[in-house]
Amino acid sequence: MNSFQVSGIGMTSQRTRERLVNRLKEEGIQNQTVLNIIANTPRHLFVDEAISHRAYEDTALPIGMGQTISQPFIVARMSELLLDTGVMDRVLEIGTGSGYQTAVLAQMFKEVYTVERIGPLQRIAQKRLRNLRAFNIYYRHGDGFQGWSEKAPYDAIIVTAAPESIPGALVEQLNEGGRLVIPVGSQTGEQELILLQKVDGELQQMSLEKVKFVPLLAGTIE
């Protein structure tokens, strides 16, 4: 697991990040490990320089190609849910995107496996993460609906885009005792954040809260 040491000034300073963390606490994020990681992760490096002054606002921001960097609260909330059963070693992320959630996961897990369908986005994210010396991340350019079966099973799976139903391949790749956190729903209707846990071979599913994510799409873009 990594710990990033990146300093900044003005809107990228540690004080600015601490203000964000205080907002997350007020909004109900309780896991101190997650809060420390959010404080330590330079979100301004994962957005275009033109909007980097907004990096520590608690809002989603565009990253190009119809995608967004998730709202920090959602990143913290989904990360917190993965840790509720204690420390786990291996996580699968569906949707590398900007690489920000990946960076958070790299400080939580020993091994992060991340799948992204849009090749240019993943290449940019990979460069950012290597510059941060996050070397415990493994990348695949592929269809998120299929997961990454060759590296399964995973202790945790996190999906950062919304399918209309939970992909069966992801459930199959979840380890016993593992947790899957995923937004589910249509783009025109409601979406819910779902927590699914595999206990004694049985699936326990819980609906948590209303959310809004970009759609999880099949196929790949070179």
Image (cartoon, rainbow, N blue to C red):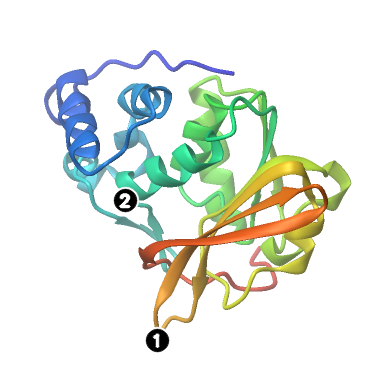
Label 2 element class: loop
Residue 188's tag is 1
Q: Earlier in the sequence, mark 2 or mark 1?
A: 2
Q: Nearer the viewer, residue 74 or 60?
A: 74
Residue placed under numbered mark 2 in the picture: 71
At horizontal 53% and vertical 53% (from top left) the residue drawn is 121
The residue at the far right in this view is 150
The residue at the far left in this view is 10
Label 1 element class: loop
Q: Nearer the viewer, residue 36 or 81?
A: 81
Relative side of 120 to 22, left or right: right
Label 2, label 1: how far apart the Cα atoms are? 20 Å
Relative side of 84 to 198, left or right: left
Q: Quadrant of the N terminus?
A: top right
Res 16 quadrant in image: top left
Q: Is residue 212 visible?
A: yes
The disc labelled 2 sits on which kind of residue? Gln
The disc labelled 1 sits on which kind of residue? Thr
At horizontal 66% and vertical 63% (from top left) the residue drawn is 222
At horizontal 55% and vertical 19% (from top left) the residue drawn is 133
